[in-house]
Amino acid sequence: AQTVTQSQPEMSVQEAETVTLSCTYDTSENNYYLFWYKQPPSRQMILVIRQEAYKQQNATENRFSVNFQKAAKSFSLKISDSQLGDTAMYFCAFMKQWSNTGKLIFGQGTTLQVKP
Amino acid sequence: DTGVSQDPRHKITKRGQNVTFRCDPISEHNRLYWYRQTLGQGPEFLTYFQNEAQLEKSRLLSDRFSAERPKGSFSTLEIQRTEQGDSAMYLCASRLTRQGTHEQYFGPGTRLTVT
């Protein structure tokens, strides 16, 4: 069975600074996808960034980038130039590539507070 | 707004009552998922539909839970004889299974409180 662990329940960062959220996972699969989802207070969860395990290059989306270390089973999210709108709960999630269900397995989440 | 809607947004019920939640996915999405999220935790998979067929149910989904997706459109999740342990946020997500697409689009959730 796959597990996803986020060891930082809460983090804070000053506006315009950079913050890194950690995620580790455990799986015996070789092909899979990893995701970071953002859940703002009282709002819908949205996808921030996705990484395919077969790709060595780390994914980037504007101010968001990941550090994917497959051997270490680590998948951290870096947010550059933090903005007040980045305040949210962030979830790391895993999905097997050849999965009939396509279900997501989530970590416990990290609450990020961006301070002005 | 992701395009996925859920109703109601909040539900308070007394233990032993039945409740039903509705999810309206993005119209062309063939997959629909239900997750449960308790306070301070990440969402946990409950069940999913491929069009109108319910193809997998988690062990978390006891016999008191039933889900339907008639005609492959909206879905309902019913909980019978609610218990305090059912208090949680119930999230719905939809997805289009097409090569290269893996994103699930989430609704705002229904927060259930069982008193």
Image (tube, coloured by chain):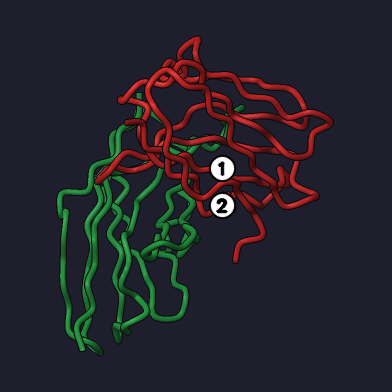
Chain colours: A green, B red
As displayed, is residue B115 above or below residue A12? Answer: above
Q: What residue is pinned by disc 1?
A: B92
Whether residues under marks 1 and 2 lie with C-beta atoms below 8 angstroms apart, the answer is yes
Q: What's the residue at 31%, 25% (across, down)?
A: B84
In front: B69, or A18? B69
In front: B15, or B36? B15
Circle 2 Cα neighbour tier, 10 Å, few/some/many (<14 / 14–19 / ≥20): many
Q: What residue is pinned by disc 2?
A: B107
In front: A5, or A73? A5
Q: Position of residue A81 (x, y in %)?
A: 30, 87
As displayed, is residue A107 above or below residue A89? Answer: above
Compute the Cα span from label 1 to label 2.
Answer: 5 Å
As displayed, is residue A89 above or below residue A65? Answer: above
Q: What's the residue at 42%, 39% (across, down)?
A: B12
Circle 1 Cα neighbour tier, 10 Å, few/some/many (<14 / 14–19 / ≥20): many
- Label 1 secondary element: strand
Q: Is A11 left or right of A79, judged from the image as shown?
A: left
As displayed, is residue B51 above or below residue B104? Answer: above
Q: Amino acid at mark 1?
A: Cys
